[in-house]
């Protein structure tokens, strides 16, 4: 498997040199592009971003409304309100059997901020962070922004796109400070089970200076009765050096409320809170009230939503797998299909444009089919595209019809 890097902007006058070494989140760029095209009157189906169509539950919106009416509109503690930190502790205990004290919890403006604060609080220039690839591209750029060096390690398709312990071992140097373990994995939908994590833990136990960044943002979106455990619950010995990250965005239909959280060792959490105090001050008070309602209210919606996503996965993957030149394995979790377009590489569009990369294919789908998808290259994977199934079934069926036509017309 070849590793590919995302496109970077050229350095510009008046900007810090590091701006030439980082890129914005590719999904956020595409989301905006799709919106602009729609504003121009184009009929675009947006399957590139990480938003689900599921609404924020009514009781969560009501809690936010109540908080606003009660004037809970001041700054909160930097690391989150006591009520939300308690709700997060209860959620970790319920979901992962993990026990954290209040000083081991931080609430942030999305898990995006949790991750950045962790890197900013710990990395010295040149420190390395192992990032299994394909990956959510912002990990790489957050590490660079914090002065570190991301070390992508290929997770081959014949290992279900999962990190092999031997590859992890080989990537470790005396500069390694973190290993990122996202489970389930954006963009491949791979799920590490307890045995997978134990095998990786056996490697890490030999390196006491390496921390684990366990990103479980999609932990509730797992299919076929599986579970996506997190490292600290699988290997208790690693808990003192693991940051267990999650958030309400994907689980509760709350992407725009911007609440993420983490549990980890108190000194690390304190340092992250210091970063947070200087960057955002604190997470939104109203959103925190909403997140308390989400985490402490009825949890039946989690399984209901996962079941609906599994139905969409099965139907949409079958439709895309039937398109000329595409191959679409079933993801075990998340709401993304990682579709191989290797079978259309080397063909040309009706206008004569060659399709040489996943990026070319994504551009072809946007131009001719009005379907926005993420190029695999933006997640470190060539000759693939990442397609979301976080939209209603009828939208997915229409997208599949358009994609089938766009594939069929390639020569
Ligand atoms: C793997 C992964 N981690 C973290 C995030 C950040 O999510 P948020 O900041 O909305 O909590 C995302 C967003 O899509 C993601 O895919």
Image: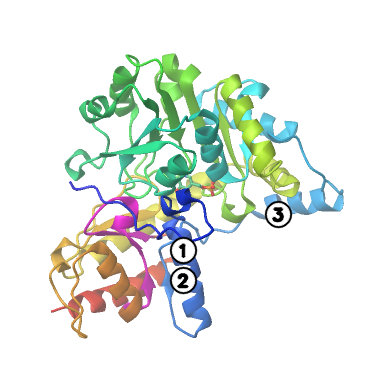
Residue displayed at 31% across by 72% down:
363
**Please, is residue 324 above or below residue 241 in the view?**
below
In this rendered view, identify the residue nearer to me: 128 or 230: 128
Residue displayed at 21% across by 26% down:
166
> In the rendered view, does 286 fall on the left or right side of 388?
right
Q: What residue does disc 3 label?
A: 61
Characterize the local packing of mark 1: few (<14), some (14-19) or many (20 or more) Cα atoms within 10 angstroms.
Answer: few
First-in-chain label (3 vs 2)? 2
Task: Give percent across and percent down for residue 80.
Answer: 70, 35
Residue interval drawn in magenta: 369-388
Secondary structure of the residue carrying tag 3 is helix
Residue 226 visible in the shown view: no
Q: What residue does disc 2 label?
A: 33
First-in-chain label (3 vs 1)? 1
> In the rendered view, does 378 fall on the left or right side of 408?
right
Residue 123 visible in the shown view: yes
């Amino acid at each position: 498997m070849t590793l590919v890097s995302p496109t970077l902007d050229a350095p510009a006058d008046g900007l810090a040199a590091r701006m030439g070494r980082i890129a914005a989140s590719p999904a956020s760029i595409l989301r905006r592009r799709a919106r602009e095209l729609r504003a121009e009157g184009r009929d675009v189906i947006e399957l590139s971003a990480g938003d689900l169509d599921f609404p924020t539950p009514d009781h969560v919106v009501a809690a936010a409304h109540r908080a606003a009416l009660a004037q809970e509109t001041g700054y909160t503690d930097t690391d989150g309100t006591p009520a939300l930190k308690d709700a997060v502790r209860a959620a970790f205990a319920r979901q992962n059997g993990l026990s954290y004290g209040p000083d081991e919890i931080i609430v942030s403006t999305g898990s995006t901020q949790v991750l950045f604060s962790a890197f900013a609080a710990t990395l010295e220039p040149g420190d390395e962070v192992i990032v299994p690839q394909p990956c959510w591209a912002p990990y790489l750029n957050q590490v660079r922004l914090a002065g570190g060096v991301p070390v992508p390690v290929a997770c081959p398709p014949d290992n279900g796109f999962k990190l092999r312990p031997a590859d992890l071992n080989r990537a470790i140097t005396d500069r390694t400070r973190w290993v990122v373990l996202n489970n389930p994995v954006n963009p491949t939908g791979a799920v590490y089970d307890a045995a997978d994590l134990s095998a990786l833990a056996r490697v890490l136990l030999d390196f006491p200076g390496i921390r684990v960044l366990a990103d479980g943002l999609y932990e509730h979106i797992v299919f076929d009765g599986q579970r996506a455990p997190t490292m600290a619950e699988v290997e208790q010995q690693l808990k003192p050096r693991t940051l267990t990250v999650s958030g309400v965005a994907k689980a509760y239909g709350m992407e725009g409320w911007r609440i993420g959280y983490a549990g980890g060792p108190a000194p690390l959490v304190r340092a992250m809170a210091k970063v947070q105090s200087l960057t955002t001050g604190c997470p939104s008070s109203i959103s925190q009230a909403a997140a308390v309602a989400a985490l402490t209210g009825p949890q039946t919606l989690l399984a209901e939503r996962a079941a609906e996503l599994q139905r969409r996965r099965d139907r949409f993957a079958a439709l895309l797998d039937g398109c000329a030149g595409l191959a679409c394995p079933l993801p075990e979790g998340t709401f993304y299909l990682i579709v191989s377009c290797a079978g259309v590489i080397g063909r040309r569009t009706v206008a004569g444009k060659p399709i040489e990369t996943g990026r070319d294919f994504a551009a072809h789908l946007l131009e001719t089919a009005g379907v926005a998808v993420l190029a695999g290259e933006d997640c470190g994977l060539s000759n693939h595209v990442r397609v979301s199934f976080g939209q209603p079934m009828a939208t997915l069926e229409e997208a599949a019809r358009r994609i089938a036509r766009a594939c069929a017309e390639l020569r």
